[in-house]
Amino acid sequence: MKKIIGNLAFVLIAVLVACGPSQEKTNDIKLPLTAEGPFFAGPTSLMHEFKPDLKALMGDDAAKLKELKLKDISVNLPEGSPYSWYDFTSASLVFVSDNSPMTSVAILNPIKSNGTNIVLTTSEEADLVEFFKEEKFTILLDLDFIEDSYEDAINADLTMNLVFKY
Amino acid sequence: MKLLKYSFLLILAVVISSSVNAQDEKADRLIGIWEPSHGKAKVKVEKIGEKYYGKIVWLREPVNPETEKPKVDKNNPDEKMRSTPLRGYRILKDFQYTSKNEWTEGTIYDPENGNTYNCIIKMTDENTLDIRGYIGISTFGRTDIWKRLKMPSKKKK
């Protein structure tokens, strides 16, 4: 009896190991984000319409993708920007598409930065597989302006470190 | 004969195009600023892609009296996202216009308990929404009435 239970447990573990993601790749994606002014105090969305290419990111393993998480996210204000991070109280990153539910993926509140760069805290739960299987989706960076601003535009550079499990 | 055929195709294209535009105009009536019945917040509905989203743009009590800091989404099920500010938070997500003055397929988030509910929005008149949140089937749920916020018109000099 003990032997049967032992064998069953071994088979169950083998099945679970075989079903779960076993390998991973990481990749950095850099994207420009932009919004047109004027801006009023409160949250404003900087946007980028992204067309993912899983084949380019993962090669032949693209079809085996099981889980996709964000490891690190940083945002830079480009050199010469009329803004500094002191102009905003918080930053949050959201993914939006026509076929998947809107997903909040990272947050920084309050903003703490000594220079042109901020690093956001990433969500543990957000799985981005469905977004990256779509033809396109929109990335929104919500910046909370402290006060009204009458600049024509705001630009920022987003760097995402992604972990692909397959 | 060819001319007749092309004329017919042209008319058909115009009819289809104007019908699509009319449908878009109907769907976009949801865009605006709305006030739930409790009066604690104002929600701005906007369109991103083909779907509609509503974010909190005003709070009657924006500051948490305990922390003396702006309120955050302290009940978010994802612990790492609990510092997200409530002002700017999208509580209505992913609504699509069906017909009959209804937007469906979306969800509503209640920041007071961290729960997300399925939701149907029905426009009963141009300035009134029935917002029905439910779990499972819409029979078992709760409806709240939201009113459109009318911006004061500028006085002519």
Image (cartoon, coloured by chain):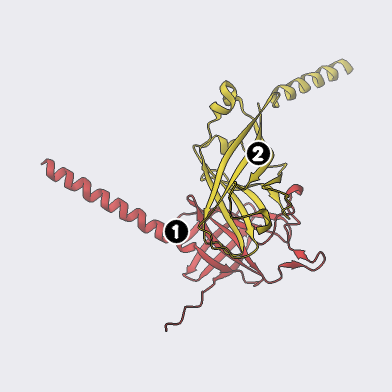
State which chain is coloured red: B
> Which residue matches tag 1?
B27
Tell me the element at label 2.
Answer: loop
> What number is the disc on residue A127?
2
Between A137 and A82, the one lying in front of the other is A82
Q: Is residue A106 left or right of residue B124?
A: right
Question: Of the residues shown, which amino acid type is indicated by label 1?
Answer: Ala
Q: x and y percent of residue A148 in the render?
A: 59, 65
Residue B44 x/y as whole percent: 56, 63
Give coordinates of residue A125: x percent, y percent.
70, 42
Specify the subunit that label 2 lies on: A
User: Going 67% across and 36% down the picture, which residue do you hit?
Assistant: A69
Q: Please indicate, yes or no, whether residue B139 appears anywhere in the rendered image.
A: no
Left or right, residue B123 beside residue B20: right
Q: Left or right: where does residue B68 sit relative to residue B138?
A: right
Instruction: Specify whether residue B74 is in view.
Output: yes
Q: Choose top left, top right, bottom left or bottom right for residue A87.
A: bottom right
